[in-house]
Image: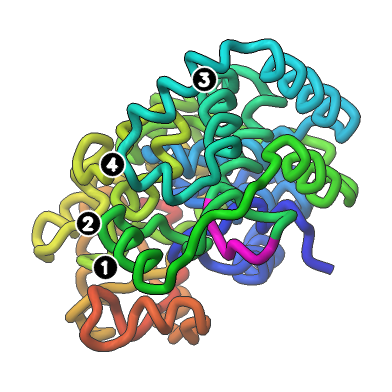
């Protein structure tokens, strides 16, 4: 049965846990280290921990880091509920005048996206949660990210007016859509939803070991984990696809909740979310492989799911092999390219005419002896 923590927060262009499980089973043994330099929502890390492997991951996007780190080290349910209750009591004592002022200072989008009392609770948690340094707060922040926007008719799941679950639609588009359909946000109690979601996500048994997660660039991976030098047995990852999406732009509302600007931004976090030209894209990947190389043990395997807009399977295969060559000159393709069927949710995002790709391909490389 699928573990409920996998779906703590929807995330665009994510691969399923059975993709990870298949390769973890085939290429690693218990207690081996598995690593993901582009963690997304942490599927590689969490599935590896569930299979009694040791796991580490990095991502440069704070949303991805928060979700992945929440899966790496979950609190006990009792502690999580106790912390929600403590925060709710603190909210009851805080200055309503200050919250009202903060709410009124936000762009119109926020006042149409959330019922006013719900927005004040969100604003309070945005300031109160110390997600960078507190394990319980990180888990609660990840829960909040997963409930921040979605279908408005699911009262025990989402805080917002009608929105997609996976990406944050732009403010102007959202306002036009809500006006056209006369949609208004429902009143939601954020603390009640967090209690409900915590009980649901922490219902099953958790991995016995904790994972390691860092908020950094893939090119700095070995510096982030100096103790993992020559320790990693398998890398299972999916880099940002060429010219498909910009994660910073798509996750702008969740980024706001974590302390960023109250509007979409494009390059304040990374210049590598969305490369539009092949040459800098493959150079970026070559630098990323160089960044993880010191962590790999002899006999390591690299499993990689790739996609790109406007590129054929053969072009992707040649580009990926060329990006590996400077760091892993003896890399050997064990399997692939294997076509991966696009899931229905991604078919809509990758349909012709959109900024998407029409296929995904899986590769397995032996990088030992390189």
Q: Regarding mark 1 in the picture, which secondary structure is present there? A: loop
Which residue was labeled with disc 3? 127
Q: Could you tell whether 91 is left or right of 367 in the image?
A: right
In the image, residue 73 lies at what x, y percent? 71, 33
**Is 68 or 325 nearer to us in this picture?**
68
Q: CA distance from mark 2 to mark 1?
A: 7 Å
Q: Residues within 10 Å of mark 4 (few under 14, many from 20)?
A: some
Q: Do tag 2 and tag 1 residues touch (Cβ < 8 Å)? A: yes
Q: Could you tell whether 262 is left or right of 190 in the image?
A: left
Mark toward the viewer: 1 or 3: 3
The magenta region covers 149-154
Mark toward the viewer: 4 or 2: 4
Q: Do tag 4 and tag 3 residues touch (Cβ < 8 Å)? A: no
Q: Name the residue rendered at 44%, 86% in the picture.
A: 339
Sequence-wise, which precedes: disc 4 or disc 1?
1
Q: Residues within 10 Å of mark 3 (few under 14, many from 20)?
A: few
Prevailing secondary structure class for the magenta stretch in the rendered image: loop
Residue 222 appears in which quarter of the rendering? top left
Sequence-wise, which precedes: disc 2 or disc 3?
3
């Amino acid at each position: 049965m699928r573990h409920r923590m996998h779906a703590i927060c929807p995330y665009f262009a994510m691969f399923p846990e059975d993709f990870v499980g298949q390769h973890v089973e085939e290429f690693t043994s218990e207690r081996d280290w598995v690593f993901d330099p582009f963690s997304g929502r942490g599927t590689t890390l969490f599935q590896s921990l569930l299979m009694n492997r040791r796991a580490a991951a990095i991502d440069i996007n704070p949303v991805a880091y928060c979700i992945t780190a929440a899966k790496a080290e979950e609190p006990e349910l009792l502690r999580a509920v106790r912390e929600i209750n403590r925060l709710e009591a603190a909210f009851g004592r805080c200055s309503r005048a200050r919250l009202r002022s903060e709410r009124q200072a936000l762009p119109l989008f926020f006042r149409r996206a959330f019922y006013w009392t719900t927005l004040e609770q969100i604003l309070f948690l945005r300031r109160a949660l110390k997600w960078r340094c507190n394990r319980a707060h990180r888990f609660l922040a990840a829960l909040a990210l997963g409930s921040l926007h979605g279908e408005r008719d699911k009262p025990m799941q989402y805080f917002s007016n009608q929105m997609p679950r996976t990406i944050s639609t732009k403010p102007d588009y959202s306002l036009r859509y809500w006006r056209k359909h006369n949609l208004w946000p429902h009143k939601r109690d954020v603390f009640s939803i967090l209690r409900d979601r915590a009980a649901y996500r922490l219902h099953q048994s958790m991995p016995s070991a904790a994972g390691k997660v860092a908020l950094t660039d893939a090119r700095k991976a070995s510096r982030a984990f100096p103790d993992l030098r020559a320790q990693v047995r398998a890398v299972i990852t999916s880099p940002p696809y060429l010219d498909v999406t910009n994660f910073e732009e798509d996750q702008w509302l969740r980024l706001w909740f974590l302390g960023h600007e109250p509007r979409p931004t494009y390059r304040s976090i990374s210049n590598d979310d969305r490369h539009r030209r092949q040459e800098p894209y493959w150079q970026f990947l070559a630098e990323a492989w160089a960044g993880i190389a010191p962590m790999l043990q002899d006999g390591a395997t690299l499993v990689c799911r790739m996609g790109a807009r406007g590129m054929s399977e053969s072009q992707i295969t040649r580009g990926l092999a060329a990006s590996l060559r400077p760091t892993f000159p003896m890399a050997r393709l064990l399997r692939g390219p294997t076509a991966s069927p696009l899931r229905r949710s991604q078919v809509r995002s990758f349909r012709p005419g959109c900024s998407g790709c029409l296929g995904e391909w899986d590769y397995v490389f032996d990088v030992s002896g390189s």
